[in-house]
Amino acid sequence: MARKYFGTDGIRGLTNMAPMTAAMAMKVGMAAGAHFRRGEHRHRVVIGKDTRLSGYMLENAMVAGFTSVGMDVVLVGPMPTPAVAMLTHSMRADLGVMISASHNPFADNGIKLFGPDGYKLSDEDELAIEALIDGDVALAQSGDIGRARRVEDARGRYIHFAKSTFPSDLRLDGLKIVVDCANGAAYQVAPSALWELGAEVVAIGVTPNGKNINHGVGSTAPQMLCETVVGSGAAIGIALDGDADRLIVADETGRVVDGDQLMATIAGGWARQGRLAGGGLVATVMSNLGLERHLSAQGLGLVRTKVGDRYVLEKMRSSGYNVGGEQSGHIILSDYATTGDGLVAALQVLAELVRAGAPASEVLHRFDPLPQLLKNVRFKGGKPLDDPRVKDMIAAAEAELDGNGRLVIRPSGTEPVIRVMAEGDDRAQVEAVVDRICDAVREAAA
């Protein structure tokens, strides 16, 4: 069954426009609270947010919704998404909520829900909540309305947790690290954790004003990070996104290191230590073929999933992997976290850097990525990928790339766009293949 409100990562949209309104946030609180009321105990929900201006509005609306159905609310303020997942589990809460639109501009916002185990909700739970949103929810009796309280030491709890994932026999003393927090949820916790581990920290993107989240900073805009690393003579730079579940790195030369290289670094280190589960890692169809070849040369495998960290995590859980993620920097380390955690992933990368005692440019560039090209073709309606001409062109391209490259074509899950990606050993061939398919899609959509 198609979902009406939930996308691949919660509910998201432009604030004060459906579905991201205060009224909808209250309905989500009522529906999710009613769905997760199981048993006679006092039920509890943890609510965190990033630094968007609209977070105040949506937070208060969700508090009203949850308390109206008898759930107590614990407010933790601006916190990374993985921190909310961790606190939901550690506080024995029945539900966790993160109010964030991740790497989107400030005007957008979103609602992500976590179950009592700290994992994102299943499709079945989301469908059940959607049904309640559009239906009638029974309100609590007057004496059973929930209470709300703010936990002031939530940041300290998460910092302690993050530090505990860094090897106890290592320190960051003498290492100058630039950390870019995207003016987002990690603006306090990430610099503090690195400093407490001994690093000399240069922090940027740590002055949120409600409107500057992800604006020219963070993992989706790494230029300032790269410039600051080179200008300050730092050993490495770390960029998180607005809700800090994504990580991109810059080496000491200012060169960007993406999620594929970081996963290769972590998986290789864990394999040498005998702690890599599953004999490889899980990534999406968008990860570079160079990563797959690099892992194969080490006797490690790569399992691919659909785009979306939830699909990566599902495969990790079902098949016993403990490292997975996306080229964009969502890195899931299931030994520590139930979702992507940019700070925890960064600490594992830093551990490899300290152990190697070599520059980041040598430690983190594990393979040369194959030429990869992605183009988007917008269409007004219909299903261009069902057109026989498009199918024939795709089949011809797959035959042409067989053994020398890879083709990924998929419709966007959020907009009327067909994404056409190809990669291979020959850049000119890749460009030609993508252009031919894009032309065919445009003709079919005309």
Image (spheres, helix red, strand yellow):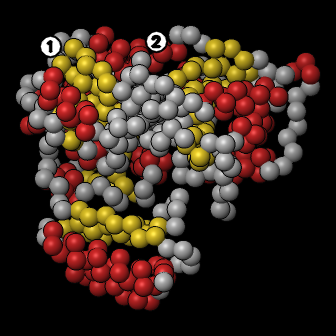
> Is 438 positioned to the left or the right of 105 in the image?
left
Residue 36 rendering spot, x and y as whole percentages: 73, 35
- Can see residue 9? yes
Structural crowding at the residue carrying mark 2, measured as other residues with C-alpha within 10 Å and reported as few (<14), some (14–19) or many (≥20): some
- Can see residue 398? no
**In this rendering, is residue 422 above or below 153?**
below
Residue 287 rendering spot, x and y as whole percentages: 29, 55
Q: Distance between the residues labelled 1 and 2?
A: 24 Å
Residue 419 rendering spot, x and y as whole percentages: 40, 66
> Is 371 positioned to the left or the right of 57 in the image?
left
**In this rendering, is residue 146 above or below 371?**
above
Number of marks present in the image shown = 2
Q: Say which residue appears at 87% left-offset and 21% top-offset.
A: 144
> Is 431 positioned to the left or the right of 389 in the image?
left
Structural crowding at the residue carrying mark 1, measured as other residues with C-alpha within 10 Å and reported as few (<14), some (14–19) or many (≥20): few
Q: Nearer the viewer, residue 202 or 338?
A: 202
Q: Say which residue appears at 18% left-offset and 12% top-offset.
A: 173
The image's mark for residue 149 is: none
Question: Could you say which quadrant of the image residue 428 lies in?
Answer: bottom left
Q: Say which residue appears at 44% left-offset and 29% top-offset.
A: 184
Residue 124 rendering spot, x and y as whole percentages: 66, 51
Q: Nearer the viewer, residue 70 or 440?
A: 440
Q: What secondary structure is found at the residue carrying circle 2?
A: helix
Q: Which amino acid does label 2 sit on?
A: Gly
Furthest residue in direction right, as rendered: 142
Q: What secondary structure is found at the residue carrying circle 1?
A: loop
The image's mark for residue 156 is: 2
**In this rendering, is residue 117 above or below 326?**
above
Residue carrying label 1: 174
Q: Which amino acid does label 1 sit on?
A: Gly
Find out whether the residues at labels 1 and 2 contact each other: C-beta distance under 8 Å: no
